[in-house]
Amino acid sequence: MSDLKKQPSINYQIKAANVNVINATTGELTQMSLHDAIELAESQDMDLVEVAHRDVPVCKIMNYGKFLYNTEKQKKKSATKKTNETKEMHFTPAIGAEDYEVKLKRIKTFLTEGAKVNVLIKMKGRERQHVEISKQLVAKIQKDCEEYINVKMSSAINATQSSVSCLLAPKNI
Protein backbone atom coordinates (compact mmCIF):
# COMPACT_ATOMS: atom_id res chain seq x y z
CA MET A 1 0.00 0.00 0.00
CA SER A 2 1.22 3.50 -0.77
CA ASP A 3 2.20 6.00 1.93
CA LEU A 4 0.83 8.85 -0.16
CA LYS A 5 -2.50 10.31 0.90
CA LYS A 6 -5.33 9.98 -1.56
CA GLN A 7 -5.73 13.14 -3.62
CA PRO A 8 -9.21 14.71 -3.38
CA SER A 9 -11.56 14.43 -6.34
CA ILE A 10 -11.81 17.58 -8.42
CA ASN A 11 -14.33 18.78 -11.01
CA TYR A 12 -15.50 15.86 -13.20
CA GLN A 13 -13.79 13.24 -10.98
CA ILE A 14 -16.55 13.70 -8.38
CA LYS A 15 -19.02 10.80 -8.60
CA ALA A 16 -22.23 12.26 -7.13
CA ALA A 17 -25.33 13.76 -8.69
CA ASN A 18 -25.79 16.44 -6.02
CA VAL A 19 -23.17 18.14 -3.85
CA ASN A 20 -23.02 20.61 -0.98
CA VAL A 21 -20.89 23.53 -2.17
CA ILE A 22 -18.90 25.94 -0.02
CA ASN A 23 -18.47 29.13 -2.02
CA ALA A 24 -14.92 30.55 -1.88
CA THR A 25 -15.99 34.19 -1.78
CA THR A 26 -19.05 34.07 0.50
CA GLY A 27 -18.42 30.90 2.52
CA GLU A 28 -22.06 29.84 2.09
CA LEU A 29 -23.01 26.15 1.99
CA THR A 30 -25.62 25.35 -0.67
CA GLN A 31 -26.81 22.10 -2.19
CA MET A 32 -26.90 21.91 -5.99
CA SER A 33 -26.36 19.50 -8.84
CA LEU A 34 -22.79 18.56 -9.73
CA HIS A 35 -23.13 20.10 -13.20
CA ASP A 36 -24.30 23.47 -11.76
CA ALA A 37 -21.53 23.43 -9.15
CA ILE A 38 -18.84 22.84 -11.79
CA GLU A 39 -20.28 25.64 -13.94
CA LEU A 40 -20.23 27.98 -10.92
CA ALA A 41 -16.60 27.10 -10.19
CA GLU A 42 -15.56 27.55 -13.82
CA SER A 43 -17.34 30.93 -13.98
CA GLN A 44 -15.03 32.06 -11.14
CA ASP A 45 -11.95 30.51 -12.85
CA MET A 46 -11.60 28.01 -9.99
CA ASP A 47 -11.99 24.29 -9.36
CA LEU A 48 -14.61 22.27 -7.49
CA VAL A 49 -12.74 20.17 -4.89
CA GLU A 50 -14.32 17.44 -2.77
CA VAL A 51 -13.32 18.13 0.86
CA ALA A 52 -15.59 15.65 2.68
CA HIS A 53 -17.04 12.42 1.36
CA ARG A 54 -20.54 11.83 2.77
CA ASP A 55 -23.95 10.78 1.41
CA VAL A 56 -24.00 14.19 -0.25
CA PRO A 57 -20.31 15.14 -0.71
CA VAL A 58 -19.11 18.51 0.54
CA CYS A 59 -17.15 20.41 -2.10
CA LYS A 60 -15.35 23.71 -2.02
CA ILE A 61 -14.73 26.17 -4.80
CA MET A 62 -11.00 26.99 -4.76
CA ASN A 63 -7.90 27.34 -6.88
CA TYR A 64 -6.64 23.74 -6.65
CA GLY A 65 -3.15 24.47 -8.00
CA LYS A 66 -2.61 27.19 -5.41
CA PHE A 67 -3.93 24.85 -2.70
CA LEU A 68 -1.40 22.13 -3.67
CA TYR A 69 1.43 24.68 -3.78
CA ASN A 70 0.61 25.98 -0.28
CA THR A 71 0.36 22.48 1.23
CA GLU A 72 3.75 21.49 -0.26
CA LYS A 73 5.27 24.73 1.01
CA GLN A 74 3.87 24.04 4.49
CA LYS A 75 5.26 20.47 4.48
CA LYS A 76 8.74 21.71 3.55
CA LYS A 77 8.62 24.41 6.21
CA SER A 78 7.62 21.98 8.95
CA ALA A 79 10.26 19.45 7.82
CA THR A 80 13.09 21.96 8.22
CA LYS A 81 12.27 22.92 11.80
CA LYS A 82 14.66 21.55 14.43
CA THR A 83 12.66 22.17 17.58
CA ASN A 84 13.18 18.70 19.08
CA GLU A 85 16.91 18.62 18.51
CA THR A 86 19.19 18.57 21.57
CA LYS A 87 22.90 19.31 21.29
CA GLU A 88 25.47 18.55 23.97
CA MET A 89 28.49 20.65 24.90
CA HIS A 90 31.22 19.19 27.15
CA PHE A 91 33.39 21.27 29.45
CA THR A 92 36.00 20.61 32.13
CA PRO A 93 36.31 22.70 35.30
CA ALA A 94 39.81 23.86 34.29
CA ILE A 95 38.82 25.22 30.85
CA GLY A 96 40.90 28.05 29.40
CA ALA A 97 39.39 31.44 28.57
CA GLU A 98 39.80 31.04 24.80
CA ASP A 99 38.31 27.54 24.79
CA TYR A 100 35.42 28.80 26.91
CA GLU A 101 34.68 31.60 24.42
CA VAL A 102 34.73 29.19 21.45
CA LYS A 103 32.34 26.77 23.15
CA LEU A 104 30.10 29.59 24.34
CA LYS A 105 29.86 30.87 20.77
CA ARG A 106 28.80 27.37 19.59
CA ILE A 107 26.15 27.20 22.34
CA LYS A 108 24.74 30.56 21.25
CA THR A 109 24.65 29.34 17.63
CA PHE A 110 22.75 26.18 18.62
CA LEU A 111 20.27 28.22 20.66
CA THR A 112 19.60 30.68 17.83
CA GLU A 113 18.97 27.72 15.49
CA GLY A 114 16.28 26.52 17.91
CA ALA A 115 18.07 23.53 19.43
CA LYS A 116 18.24 22.80 23.15
CA VAL A 117 21.75 22.55 24.59
CA ASN A 118 22.78 20.18 27.35
CA VAL A 119 25.83 21.66 29.11
CA LEU A 120 27.90 18.90 30.74
CA ILE A 121 30.95 19.48 32.91
CA LYS A 122 32.93 16.29 33.50
CA MET A 123 35.13 16.09 36.57
CA LYS A 124 38.07 13.72 36.99
CA GLY A 125 40.28 12.86 39.95
CA ARG A 126 40.68 15.70 42.44
CA GLU A 127 38.23 17.90 40.49
CA ARG A 128 35.45 15.80 42.07
CA GLN A 129 36.28 17.27 45.49
CA HIS A 130 35.45 20.78 44.22
CA VAL A 131 31.94 20.45 42.76
CA GLU A 132 31.26 24.12 43.57
CA ILE A 133 33.77 25.19 40.86
CA SER A 134 31.79 23.24 38.25
CA LYS A 135 28.49 24.66 39.52
CA GLN A 136 29.93 28.18 39.25
CA LEU A 137 31.02 27.44 35.67
CA VAL A 138 27.48 26.30 34.72
CA ALA A 139 26.03 29.41 36.39
CA LYS A 140 28.48 31.55 34.37
CA ILE A 141 27.42 29.82 31.14
CA GLN A 142 23.76 30.44 31.99
CA LYS A 143 24.50 34.10 32.71
CA ASP A 144 26.50 34.57 29.48
CA CYS A 145 23.70 32.97 27.42
CA GLU A 146 20.91 34.81 29.24
CA GLU A 147 19.72 36.71 26.15
CA TYR A 148 19.44 33.46 24.13
CA ILE A 149 17.76 31.12 26.65
CA ASN A 150 14.28 30.83 28.05
CA VAL A 151 15.04 31.11 31.77
CA LYS A 152 11.76 29.45 32.83
CA MET A 153 12.24 26.46 30.50
CA SER A 154 15.95 25.92 31.26
CA SER A 155 16.57 23.33 33.93
CA ALA A 156 18.34 23.78 37.21
CA ILE A 157 21.92 22.69 37.76
CA ASN A 158 22.14 18.92 38.30
CA ALA A 159 25.19 17.53 40.09
CA THR A 160 26.34 13.92 40.31
CA GLN A 161 29.56 12.50 41.70
CA SER A 162 31.47 12.92 38.45
CA SER A 163 29.57 15.58 36.49
CA VAL A 164 27.47 18.74 36.64
CA SER A 165 24.88 19.45 33.95
CA CYS A 166 22.17 21.85 32.88
CA LEU A 167 19.74 21.89 29.94
CA LEU A 168 19.38 25.27 28.18
CA ALA A 169 16.20 25.88 26.18
CA PRO A 170 16.12 28.52 23.42
CA LYS A 171 13.91 31.61 23.73
CA ASN A 172 11.76 30.83 20.71
CA ILE A 173 10.15 27.72 22.33
Image (cartoon, helix red, strand yellow):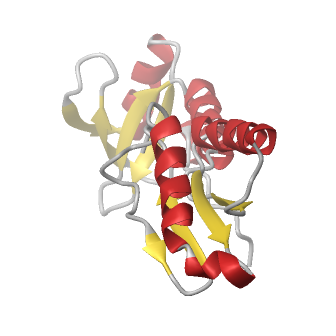
How far from the left and from the top, in percent, is residue 72? 65, 38
Residue 168: tell me if it is visible.
no
* Residue at horizontal 67 percent and vertical 62 percent from the top: 93
The quadrant where residue 64 appears: top right
Camera-nearest residue between 50 and 92: 92
Q: Is residue 115 left or right of residue 21?
A: right
How far from the left and from the top, in percent, is residue 6? 61, 60
When the figure is inspected, residue 26 is found, relative to residue 160, above or below; the finding is above
Camera-nearest residue between 96 and 61: 96
Residue 11: tell me if it is visible.
yes
Outermost bottom residue: 161
Camera-nearest residue between 146 and 12: 146
- How many numbered discs, if any? 0
How far from the left and from the top, in percent, is residue 19? 33, 45
When the figure is inspected, residue 17 is found, relative to residue 131, above or below; the finding is above
When the figure is inspected, residue 126 is found, relative to residue 155, above or below; the finding is below
* Residue at horizontal 43 percent and vertical 66 percent from the top: 157
Q: Is residue 146 left or right of residue 27?
A: right
- In the rendered image, which quarter contains the C terminus? top left
How far from the left and from the top, in percent, is residue 4? 69, 62
- In the rendered image, which quarter contains the N terminus? bottom right
